[in-house]
Structures are given as C-alpha cells and as structure tokens.
Image: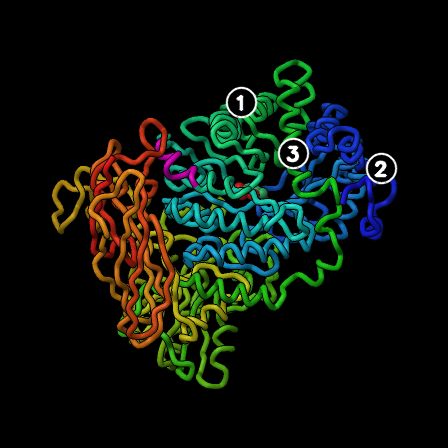
Amino acid sequence: MTLLNPTRRLLLQGVSAAALVAVAALGVARAKATGKAVDSIEDLISKMSIEEKAGQLSLFSDPTRFQGAIINPTSEQAATKDRVYADIAAGRITGLFNGIGVAGAREMQKIAVEQSPHGIPLVFAGDVIHGLKTTFPIPLAEAASFDTDLAFRTARAAAVEATAVGLHWTFAPMVDVARDQRWGRNAEGAGEDTFLGSQFAVARVNGFQGSSLKDDTSLLACPKHFAAYGAVQGGMDYNTADIPETTLRQTHLPPFQAAFDAGALSTMSAFNDVAGVPSTGNHYLLTDILRGEWGFKGLVVSDYTSEEELVAHGFAADGADATAKAINAGCDVAMQSGLYNAYLPDLVRNGTVSMATVDEAVRRVLRVKQALGLFDNPYRSLELDREKTDIRTAETLALAREAGRKSIVLLKNEGGLLPLSKSARIALIGPCIDDKYDYPGPWAVFPDIATCVTMAEGFQAAMGADGTLTMAKGSHYESLYDGGIDEAVRAAEASDVVVLVIGESAGMSGEAQSRVDISIPEAQLTLAEAVAATGKPVVVLLRHGRALALTGAANTAPAILATWFLGSETGHSVADIVFGDYAPQGRLPVSFPQASGQEPYYYNHRATGRPQRTADREYKARYREVTNEALYPFGHGLTYGDISYGATMVDAAKLKWNGTVGVSATVSNKGRRAAHEVVQLYIHDRVASLTQPVRALTGFRHIDLAPGETQTVTFTLRRSDLEFMTAKLRFAAEPGLFDIWIAPSAVGGIPASVELIA
Ligand code: BGC
C-alpha cells in the first residue's frame, strides 16, 4: 500500500486527508522519479532543513506513556507531554522509546505526519528484552536451553505482543559475550561463549524481525552493545574494555556480525571505550568495521546519552565536540541527550560536520523507517484491536512455561532425590516464594506482574490436594528478620523434604548491578545452614542472573537446580521439572566458579604456559585456595536419565584443506527415565601462531533418549570450524593437530584428534 493510493483501510484507521498529503512526500517523489524508494528518500533529504535533519537523528524516552519500571537515570529530556507534542510537530524527534499504548502512539503519529515539516513518521521503540506483558526467561536462562528454535519462538511471540502495543523497534537482542560473572548484564545475554552467542543472536533477530520487516507483527532488532561491552574490566558496568584486537574480533564481534548477516538493521553503540576509544566516538568500530568490512546498511543509535558521555570520558571537550565526534564516527542517532538537536545545525554551518555526513545519517534512518513500512502506513502496528487480542494469549503463556522449563539446569541430583513426589510433605522456603515483583526478573520493562506465577502458586497447583505444602519466607533477600529462620526451621521439620529457593533478587543483576562477590547473600546462606541443620533432604532452587559461587549448605545440598529468572510462568515451569512431569534439559551457558575471586572465569580461556593439570600445586597457574576446576562447568546439565558417552571417533585421521571429517560418539541412557541430551562438540588447536582456547564449542545437537537407548551422534568437521583470528586480523585455520571431544560439557568426553593438512 502506498500513500499515493490510500486505501479504505488507511482512511478507516483515522488517517486524515491532510496526513496523507503530508506524508505523501515520499510517494510523490517515488512516482516522479524512477520508482525506486531510494530516490524518494533523496528527494526528501534535499528538502529538509538542517534542524529537521537533526530532529530525525534525535530519539527520546517517552514521558507520555511510560508505565513500566524505571530503568534509566532521569533526564532533562524526560519532559512534559506538551513539550513532546510540540517537538514532534516541529520535527525535532525521530521517535520515542519505552512508552506503550496504541491510542497515545496514534495521537503522536498523527501530529508527526500532519504537522511536522515533511510529515515523516515517528518510530516507536522499547526495551523488549525477554518478552513484554508475557515475560519469558531472561536471555541468559534461555541460552541455557541451548535451543535456538525456542529463542526464535519467544522472540517472535515478544514481537507480536510488542507490535500489538504500538512498538516498531526493540533494543534487543543483547549479544555481548560476557566472561566475567561480576557483570550484572550477563542476565541479558547468551553467556560466555561466542559460538553459542552467535547462534542465539541469529535466532533472536529472526524471531523479532519475522519474514518481512514491513509485517504488522515485525519488530526491528537492535543487537547491542557495539562493542565489547561484555568485556568491561573487573566486570564493573560502564568500565573500560582494554582488550587486544584479536580478542575483540574473535570473541566479541562474531555475534554482531552474525546478527547483521541475519538482517538486523540497527545497532546500539556501547557505553564503554575499547582500547581507549569510547564506542560512540569510535570511527574504527562504527564505520571501518561495521560498514566498511561488514557492509552494514542499518542505523547506529547511541546508548542512552553515551554521546554526551564522551565528555566525561575525556574524549570530547563539551557537548558540541561530543556531537561532532559521535556523528563523524558513525553514530547516526543520539538517544536521549538532545545533543544533536542542540549542536548539529551550528556544527554544519561552521564546517565541523559536513552536510554529507548528516545526510548519510538521515538517509540511514529514513531507510530503516521505510524498511519498516512506516512511509506506506505510518499507523502500522498501531491498531487498537490487537492491543486487546494479542496480549497474553494462551499460546504465548504456554510458550513461556515451555521456555521456563527448558531453561532450568539440573546441576546436581545425589541419590536421585529429584524428581519429588507430588504427595510428599514439602516445605517451600525462601524470600521470593510469593514475592510477585521478583518474578519478571531483571530488564523487564512492561511486565504483567500480577499474573506472574510464583513458586508458591506453581507448587500448589502441581500438588493439588495430593501432598502437603508448608511455606515460609525465612529471610529477606539481603537481611534477616525476627522469627524468619525459626519459622523456616519449623516448616522444614514438619516436612519430608525441603525446597529452598535462594539466590539473587531480580534487582541484583541487570544494568549497573555489578557485584564484587557473586555468592548468595549472607542472610540467605544463614537460612540455608539453619534449614540444612534439620537433617531433612534439601533441594536448592537457585535464583540468579549470572553464575554464582556456591558455598556452605547452598553447595552441599544433595540436589541443586539453576532456575535463573524465568518470567511469567516461573512457578509452573519449575514444578514441571521438580515433580518430573518433564525431563530437565538445560545446560550452563556460563561456568560456575568455586569462588568469586576466580572471575573472570570462563571455560575457553587461552592455554597458559603453566597449566595445572594434576594436583601439582607448585608454580602453576592457580590460586592458593581453590583448584582450577569449575564447580559446574560450561555446558553442564544433568537429566533424570543416566547418560554415558562413548569415545570420540573420527572417520579419517586427516582433514584435507577443503574436505570434511565425520566425528561421532555413542550416547547411551542407562537410566529408567527418558532423557533429553545436549551433545556438544569441542575442539582445541594444539599448536598455533597465537595461543588458543583450551577448548572451544564448535557444535551441539539435541537428542531424546528413551531408557536403555543408545544413539550415535555425528558431526561434520570442516576447516572453517578450526579457524581463529590471527595476528593479521583475519580468520584462518593453520595446518596441524586438533583435539576433538564429543562431550556432555566443556570438561567431559574422551577425545580423538585430527590433522588438518594444507
Ligand atoms: C541501556 C540500553 C537500553 C537503553 C534504553 C541503557 O541504559 O544500556 O541497553 O537499551 O538504556 O533503555
């Protein structure tokens, strides 16, 4: 549908004739010129004033329809409704973010298309990180499913809900690889592994964007934060990322490139500097690599005032300088600072920024708006009906429950304590068990909190009248309260088994929630010791937005499940696994260290010259207090089956340069329950021109195994699987020997080797 031929539908949607004329600029230009959309954008750019161009490059949070959680520092720009409406009419705003509600969006869109100088439609954005009203597991949890189809489906469902409330653009997926668990934003990503992260990046982009960006349910994706935000030193949010370029390119950039190859048309520049150059003023990142090497055609938006922060970084002298440095580096859109509106016109007049640079940024923005179909129909995704019908559908809630279930990782199950019987006497203990507010998890901006299913509700629903459920909070998240422990101990004593839900509160991870100590808070550890002292068997359900360092009774409990933050259907998902209605299948996307002080602790670290391979402690790469083994390694996750792996076999000892080698192993379930196994392929390059990871994930496969069943799993290995980022800054494989494991985790498996020959 074009605006030259307004259909009845558009008129029925309330688009007035004046609006059609105003927005028709593109359509007219398109008709007069060659019929190619790009000509109409050029025509439009040629008519815009520099002030209006600056407006197209300025994005603001929406103070008029904000209904969610406060997620950012307040700002001058979070002004009144009158101010926002006036700015839209004056063409000073390209779009708004983190407001939802179709009626208000239509009102603002009407002003944009009818009153602003060239009637350019607004784009509405939001942080839809793990669902909207229906909250799915936090992205880190979902990565534990190792199930990219699941990630595709939850992103698709999130896009349906988000577009139903009037959003066009999500600031997701976060594709930052995070190897330091102190960093609070681990919760938003896919964990510590680049290969896994790239697979999830693609799945999420495809899910958000759907088959065509123009579709009413398609949401523009924004892989973020470009770049190396996950590498902030010491895991402290916003800190510097001082990494060599080989690490930048080998570890941190591939998920971005994969996301852009999948069609993501926007990205967000990170807060941090990389090797001294803040990302938002980083020409090498935003222009040379992103557009030059990768051919990215979308737009770059700054992260919430990060262009303004070039001043605090000491990289720019003042707002004008920061504006020039950001736009000249390739940052097209300023989020929230208002700097581009304030300074771009003068900077162009005095020649500090060329009109060509501004035009190129505007061109990128308009092309994205065009790709979203906003010029054809400014009211796309602004339908009052869908806002009622497409939210929290039965299908979406079922998906949330499934996603929750598949994200849970069984870390330990001594003596087959799990699954529990629904007719047991169970004491459910922990500060969050009926705290609705904790259930959406971190970075949930628009959740429907009241309908979140708590652990208390989930257990009650699963057990019905069969068993006895006694509940006690026991402690607050980070402090004790009078009588709490006593009540918990009484509940434990009256039970056959204790289910102890401990860990972080939702507010302890997410943005700006870095921790020096990634243990369970002291108060809850005290609770855990008191409960364990009753002698009752204890199942620990961890709540967390990162890997944890487990100590004391939280560590020695016979059964432990990693349950992260699972969103809307948490209680049901957890009960599905605890009572054995479904088999656990999750795998850790992050390594659990033995102690916080080991961070950054990740499985695929480079080989050192003094590895500690045995109990030998002298002059080895180790700490005094702990061994180097993970408490629970990357990829680890048990099932209710009894799984064993045969030795890794290769069908040829040599891999020819352009050839393939089949790598296989048998996987057996000797247990009495069905199991779902995530079979993993790891490689290690024995000798290379740069030190290589001790192991690197190169593939994984899901299989279902009935009791007593054995399957042979085969992977095909190619040279491309053996490549690394060389000192010449190119991915290449080097001939020589490689170790290969088919394994249940980053530490298991019986290896084979293969020689790559040139
Ligand atoms: C975060 C981004 C987010 C933005 C807008 C920033 O503080 O770093 O990830 O998209 O706010 O809410």
Picture residue at 32% right of the left edge, 53% below the top: 715
> In the structure shown, which secondary structural element does the residue marked by tag 2 occupy?
helix
Closer to the observer: label 2 or label 3?
2
Residue sitting farthest toward the bottom: 466
Density class for disc 3 (Cα within 10 Å; few <14, some 14-19, many ≥20) is many
Q: In this image, 671 relative to 193: left or right?
A: left
Density class for disc 2 (Cα within 10 Å; few <14, some 14-19, many ≥20) is some
Picture residue at 25% right of the left edge, 65% below the top: 644
Picture residue at 27% right of the left edge, 42% below the top: 693
Distance from label 2 to label 1 (Cα)? 42 Å
Q: Does residue 592 appear in this view? A: no
Distance from label 2 to label 3 (Cα)? 21 Å
Q: Check disc 2 and give the amino acid type.
A: Val
User: Magenta span has 259?
Assistant: no
Q: Which mark is residue 316?
A: 1
Could you tell me how many numbered marks the image carries?
A: 3
Q: Position of residue 205 (x, y in %)?
A: 53, 47
Closer to the observer: label 1 or label 3?
3
Residue 495 position (above or below residue 667): below
Residue 547 position (above or below residue 570): above
The residue segment tinted magenta is: 246-254
Q: Position of residue 137 (x, y in %)?
A: 49, 59
What residue is disc 2 on?
21
What residue is disc 3 on?
365
Quarter of the rendering occupied by the N terminus: top right
